[in-house]
Every structure is written in C-alpha cells, then in structure tokens.
Image (cartoon, grey):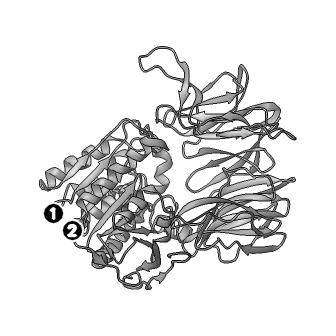
Amino acid sequence: VWERRRVGDDVAEITLDENAAPATLASEYGGAPYRGFVRGVSHVVVAPDGEAVAYTVDATGDEVYSLEVLPTRPSVLAVDAVVAWGPDDALIFLRSDATGRPHEIWSARPGEETLLHSEQDARFRLELSTAADGTPLVLSRSRDSAEALRVTIDGVEVVAPRRPGVAVVACDQTGGVDWRVEANGDETSLVRGESRIAVPGAAALEAVAAVGPATAIVGGVADARGAAWLVDGDVVSEIAPPEPYDDVCVRDDVALAPPLVALEVAAPHRFARVLPYDATKKDWAEAPPPPTAFEASLRTERGDVAGVPLSLALPPGETTRGVALYAYGAYGARLPRALDGERAALLKWGHAVALTGIRGGGELGPAWHAAGRASRKAASAADVESCAELLKERFGAVVARGRSAGGLSVGGALCRRPELFSAVALDVPFLDPLFTLQDAALPLTVNEWEEFGNPHEGGAREAIAEFSPLRRASALGRALPPTLLRPALRDARTGWWESFKFAAAARFSAPASNVVVHADDRGHFGPAAGRAHADDVALPVAWLLERGDAGEGVPIADGAAAGEGGAAGEDGAAGEGG
C-alpha cells in the first residue's frame, strides 16, 4: 500500500493499494476493454511533485503491460514494464516489436503519445531507469555492446556512445556528473565523468547509485557473492553486510532520499532484506530484524567443486533426506543466494539446499560468463554434473531445480548422467536451442545469438547441437528419473512446445523415463504474490519431496565436500542458532 503525508499533516492518504489497483482490462470474450481491479502491479513511480503515481500492470501474464496513473489519466496500452516521469510531467515508457524486444522510447501526456527514439538494430534491447536526479535514462544493450541515452525536454541525447566490444552495464547521474559501469572483455570498470576509478577486490561491477557529484555506491561481485562499495571522492571502501548476511546488492528500483541508498542483504539461511545505507555516515541506517526461529535453526557452508562456487543451507537437526541442487549459468547472471519460500519448504522437510555458481553465470566475473557461453556452453551442464556427483556422495539423494535458461544446464546434465538425480523439476525450461535459435521471428532469438551461438553458422550449429538437452534426450543411455517440466502457455520468452518435444524424445529414446509435462495459462515469471504464487511454488516442491527422498535420514557431515581442485567448505553460519 502506497501512502503519502503532506508536510505538517500526520494523516496518511492512500494513493495506491497494490491489492486492488485500478486498470484497463481486456475482455475475455472479445469485447471492448473495461475498467476493473487487479492484484499486484509490476512497477510504481511517484511523480516528482508527489501529486500522482504511475504504475504498470500485466493482467494476462504475457508481458504486455498497461500504464495507469492515479489520479486517473487515460490508460496507455501495450507498454514495457518500467516507466519513468520525464520533463514537463510527461511519462516516459518503452514499446516492443513483434518479437517482444523493447525498441522504442515514447512519452505520454493526457491525450498525446510521442515517439522519441527507435532502435533499429535487432540485437539491441532498450532498458529504462530513473537517475538519482530524476532524469530518465535508457541503456540500448546487446550481449556485447551498449550505449547510454537520456531523455531531456529537447528529446533523446547520447550520454555514452556505442563502441564495439564495450558495454555500458549501468549508469546514473546527479549534480551534473555522469556515473557509469563499463565492461570491456573480461574487465569491468567504474567511470565518474571521464575518470576511471579502481574498485579493489571486485571480480565484476554491475550497478551504480549516485549520491552526489563525488559520491556513489557501486554494486558488483567479490568472492562469488554480491558486494557493494562506497566511493567517496578518491576513497573506495567495501560495505560490510550486517551479520550473518554475506551478500549485498544495490536496489536501484527502490528510491530513497540522498544520502540514503537501498541495499539488499541476503544469505542462504536468511530471507533477503532491503535496508537503507547512509553514504554520509558510512553506516547502515537500520539494522535487519531479528531472525525468525526457523532462520536461526539453519546453518550454512561455502566451498567449491573443482572451482565451481557452492553454497549450502543445511536443515535443522543432524540428518537430511537429500539435497536440492539449484543451477542457472547464463547471461553472466548470478543465481540468487537468499532464502525464499520454496527453499524454506525444502529445508523444513529435511532437504539441504545447494546453490551452484556454474560457468556461464556471473559468480566469478565476466571471464566465468565467457567460459560457459556460445561454443563453450556445454561447460554449464558439465559443472552441474560435477556438483551433483559430489553432493550425491554426501547426501545420498540429489533433486535438481532449473529455470528458463537453467534448463540448458540442468536438463543437459540430466540427460548425460540421469543416475545422479532422484528427481528434477524444470520451470519454463529452454530445452531446444537448435530449433528455437534458427527462427529469428521468435521472441529474443536474434538477441540470443551472442549468448548461445547462431545455428545458421556451421561451427556454432555443431556446438549448439552438442549442448542441446533435446538432442541429448533423443539418445538416452538409460531412463530419466521423475522429471517435471512446467512450460507456460503465455510465455513470451521460452516456447511451451519445447517441453512437449523433450518429453516425447525422452519417452521414445528410453520408454521407462518418467517425464510429466504440466502446462498452465501463465507467463514466464508466474504469479508474483498471494495464493497463486504459493500454489505455483508448492507444485515443484511436492514433486521433489515425494520422489526425491533418500529415505532414512543421512547424517550431516562437517564441511562441504569438494571435488578435484576444490577447497573444503567453511562453516558460514553466524548469529543465533547459526
């Protein structure tokens, strides 16, 4: 619930209730759109003068949004999720092409919509944000290059031009000074104006939040975990998370008045919390709440398996009934390490949770991403195999979870080494890259060639065929364990048909394979909150618990196992009951 209080007035006025947000909805029967209410919104921004609030709504789950404003203005239809307030009370938003690629910058005032900029290169997607000084900023980004734009009263101007091989990862501005994070090959750097600033200990930089012309907080990666640094003039210092948290990231989507910056802290045995950090006092403005009794009963370990970062959350008690392995490994993105509802359910019922930072992800910086992309993509599945093998030795039974592009890594490992897994659950999985990446008319395809390879090129085609889970499922050496595939019929990113093709191939190749496809009418990300979200999480948890139980409790050995070349894990628990 969004509230406001006028200066000198203690009475709160509700401006938006996200549980009953007014929206323009499409008729299920083909009629005209109508006004109704929805539960849950995608993005909210308050007008600079505090007199209005704008928000976006995806009522169908297919990632096509409507832009709503309170007090009521006419709705703006078919927009992207993020919106910003621009000059002269205009709303700035993006629109997508037929493949779902955000490619146009628009402004809207009551009764008027104006196209400001169009990105013609199909490899580039637009991303909208709001700078610390309120200026709308746009990144035009491919997988290997990017430029930064800003929206002014005169139109769109270039902040940082497009340069081959150099990508603007993040940008912000305040007090007339531009801040940005740039990536060039295996290196990322922080730039203030035209000066580069060294950030000691950073494996990679990912975000920047400007506080003043000489002060900012930059987010990135250190020691395979999220980290943040305070930049104050020429002095750079790492921000220590409050114990027992060990992971920090910049939340540039949460607006706070300077010198406060919103930072999210997390750990495998703690739910994520967003806390304000005071850049002037160089300290946390608030302490995290005390742990719940359940959080306090958990323990953690950190280590690596043949160089692959591994974090473990261990359930209460001295035994487990198995371990749930999570993996992603794509786009240079890090697997979230925070405790969430799904992982808490598995822990409550006696399973350990293993979070793996496989190649293709961003846990060890850009070079780690490069080691698991394009022609080297098969390394992601190989890392899952290595981790699963070691975890099976320790915990007796391994169940695995993968989502979206994580289907390539977990699905690929499943087909090569099905004996390692007791059960698998894959949500909206990417399983047929060879076919999907050939069709440039499908959403995201052209943009994905830089990540996975272009099958229209001979060498790349062979590499894609080698790591394709569908191809591997067509030549199984033994039956697959219980495997749940959950495609979404309204998915704008991953084709629902890929799961059905995979299941058919596995059943034909190894008829004893137990593969179930559960497709439902939702989008790629599923319900965000409420009972629908709980039901969405409960299905894969129930599948894994029922089919992936090691039986008699397996004693929890001390220390995380490590493979050849890996280091034994350390006890990372801290705080009450840790």
Q: Residue at x 46, y 51 (%)?
A: 449
Q: Nearer the viewer, mark 2 or mark 1?
A: 2
Determine contact: label 2, label 1, CB under 8 Å: yes
Q: Earlier in the sequence, mark 2 or mark 1?
A: 2
In this rendering, would 168 be left or right of 401?
right
Q: Is residue 101 above or below residue 335?
A: above
* The label number, if any, that marks residue 81 in the structure image: none
Residue 222: percent from the left, percent from the top? 60, 73
Residue wearing tag 2:
419
Residue wearing tag 1:
478
Residue 534: percent from the left, percent from the top? 42, 47
Residue 390: percent from the left, percent from the top? 32, 77
- Quadrant where the N terminus lies? top right
Between 36 and 111, the one lying in front of the other is 36
Q: Secondary structure at mark 2?
A: helix
- The answer to whether one can see residue 395 in this image is yes
Q: Is residue 25 above or below residue 94?
A: above
Q: Pointer 1: residues within 10 angstroms few (<14), some, or many (20+)? A: some
Q: Residue at x 21, y 60 (%)?
A: 481
**Amino acid identity at mark 2:** Glu
- The answer to whether one can see residue 154 in this image is no
Q: Residue furthest top?
A: 31
In this rendering, would 478 be left or right of 498?
left
Q: Residue at x 43, y 73 (%)?
A: 312
Q: Secondary structure at mark 1?
A: loop
Q: Is residue 86 above or below residue 471?
A: above
Between 111 and 162, the one lying in front of the other is 111
